[in-house]
Image (cartoon, helix red, strand yellow):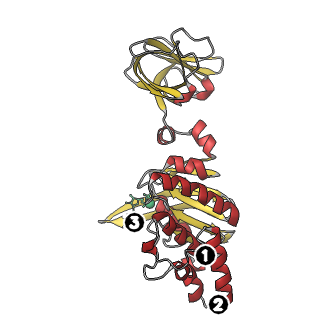
Amino acid sequence: PAIELDGVVKEYLANGEVVQAVKGVTLSIAEGEFFSLLGPSGCGKTTTMRMIAGFEDPSRGVVRLHGRDVTNVPPNRRDVNMVFQSYALFPHMNVWENVAFGLRRRKTPEAEIKRRVGETLEIVDLVGREKRRPREMSGGQQQRVALARALVNRPRALLLDEPLGALDLKLRQAMQIELKRIQREVGITFVYVTHDQSEALTMSDRIAVMHDGLVEQLASPREIYERPATAFVAGFIGTSNLIRGTVDRVESGNAVLALDEGGRVLVAEASHRAGDPITITVRPEKITISTEEPAGGLSAVRGTVSEVVYLGLYNSYAVRLADGAEVTVFQQNALDSSSTAERGDAVWLSWQPHHS
Ligand code: ADP
Ligand code: MG
């Protein structure tokens, strides 16, 4: 693996109290992987990155880069580079000088500087802009310069901490595709920090979802979306519905939830016992809305439509259940949409048990 964290903890002393920014992270990132740390503000993403880069020493645990223990090795002796959201470009230098700066300082021969800066500017698509200064460029272009400056050192891994955070949505989406292309082209490991779930889902090979200093789930984007391991992950990624109930009985390998207003929710986990409280999550697009009682074998609950929003390709329904919970349902619009439910209708919601 390119990067390994083994039981890494980071504690700070703030106003005489110990704050655990990172509470014990163990993960392994493969060479050439596009790996994201995703989570809300304050969950410990930046602290984790800074320990990989060497800007922070872990309070406990081990950091390994390409098999070597670097836990107490300074940043400049690690084969990684970090790109910051703030770009941190030199304002008085033009693009070429900004990118060449690190190589110059290390007394790289002039011919090699020329070749490497040229190559790198080509990769980030800045050929022809060599003489511009940062303030004469857009935010997206400045970000490319920052990227070039990190790539020109040819690190084996690049760490990016919310690098697109300062860009507007359209530019951010364009840069997401661009970053993915660049990563494929240079073929090195990217570790990407973001609080934006769609960004992580679009770009990553794997995602570690962090919450309160810990990794809650580490998996592919698809798995995280389709099979969130915890209620936190389900709530943080995409739109998700939480349905609460108590196990009524266990029946042919399914726990059957007792619901106030009839209906049945099947949970494919035989380890539950009658009386256990359970919260399940279901994605809006996995739910079917109907006025007739669905067939057996499906999970089904009753509710009343409280809102219908037409969204072109599909409708978004808000359906209120007997216990007051509101469930969001996305239903694709068929050519013949005469059978769709309306506000105030009593309906059934159903889904395959393995979708919850
Ligand atoms: P994220 O990047 O996910 O927003 P951070 O890693 O920056 O989160 O911070 C995680 C937690 O650690 C936060 O509660 C933050 O306030 C705290 N923290 C980070 N750096 C320090 C520090 N130097 N001193 C004290 N607390 C810190
Ligand atoms: Mg941060």
Asked whether the residues under the numbered discs 2 and 3 touch, taking CB atoms below 8 Å apart as contact, a structural biologist would say: no
User: Reading the chain from its start, which is encountered first: label 2 or label 1?
Assistant: 1
Task: Tell me if mark 2 has few (under 14), some (14-19) or many (20+) residues whose alpha carbon lies within 10 angstroms of its own.
Answer: few
Which amino acid does the dot numbered 3 rest on? Answer: Tyr
User: Residue under circle 3?
Assistant: 12
Mark positioned earlier in the residue sequence (2 or 3): 3
Judged left or right of residue 67, residue 267 is left
Question: Which residue type does callout 1 highlight?
Answer: Arg
Count how many numbered circles sit on residues in the image: 3
Q: Is mark 3 within 8 Å of ligand 1?
A: yes
- Mark 1, residue position: 78
Amino acid carrying mark 2 in the image: Glu
Nearest to N terminus: mark 1 or mark 3: 3
Say which quarter of the image contains residue 295: top right
Ligand 1 quadrant?
bottom left
Q: Secondary structure at mark 1?
A: loop
Name the residue carrying label 2: 110
